Image (cartoon, rainbow, N blue to C red):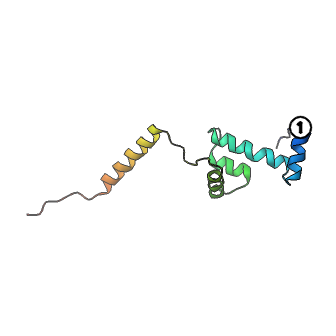
Amino acid sequence: MSTVQLELDEDLVALLQESNASVPGAVLEPTVMELYRRGSISGGKAAQLLGMTRLAFIHHAADLGIPYFNLDTDDWETDRAFIDALGTAARPAETSVR
């Protein structure tokens, strides 16, 4: 683990202390969430860094308004076509009755 020193305004430190927030925790959680939101780290890595299960992380991200699944239109269409193809392949072949 690396150690980093940050200079924080005294007013900010006082506010964190008044709210009973630890300074390291107050820096770690938003930093990890922002890295995840930007796509710099995976949900699994973010959960690990925050000491959460993946499911707890999904709920936490949702509570903060950060979607766990973030598909653009092309990704959505590709996934939908794949699922449609699976559905077609899973259907039994029609047989004619004479």
Residue at left 70%, top 56%?
Answer: 52
On the picture, is 46 further left or further right than 84? right
Mark 1 residue crowding within 10 angstroms, few (<14) / some (14–19) / many (20+): few
Q: What percent of the width, then of the height, locates residue 70?
A: 54, 44
In percent of the image, x 89 and y 36: which residue is there? Answer: 7
Quadrant in the rendering for residue 40: top right
Is 65 left, or right, of 71 in this rendering? right
Badge 1 amino acid: Asp
Q: Which residue is mark 1?
A: 9
**Residue located 65% across and 41% down the image:** 41
Q: Quadrant of the N terminus?
A: top right
Image coordinates of residue 82 in percent, x first then y, are 39, 46
On the image, the x and y values in percent for residue 60 come to: 66, 54
Number of numbered labels in the structure image: 1
Residue 12 position by quadrant: top right
**Residue projecting furthest to the left:** 98
Position of residue 95 relative to residue 28, above or below, is below
Decide which of 17, 3 is in the foreground and name it: 17
The x, y position of residue 23, in whole percent, is 85, 47
Residue reaching furthest top?
A: 7
Q: Secondary structure at mark 1?
A: loop
Which residue is at 20% across, 58% downward?
94
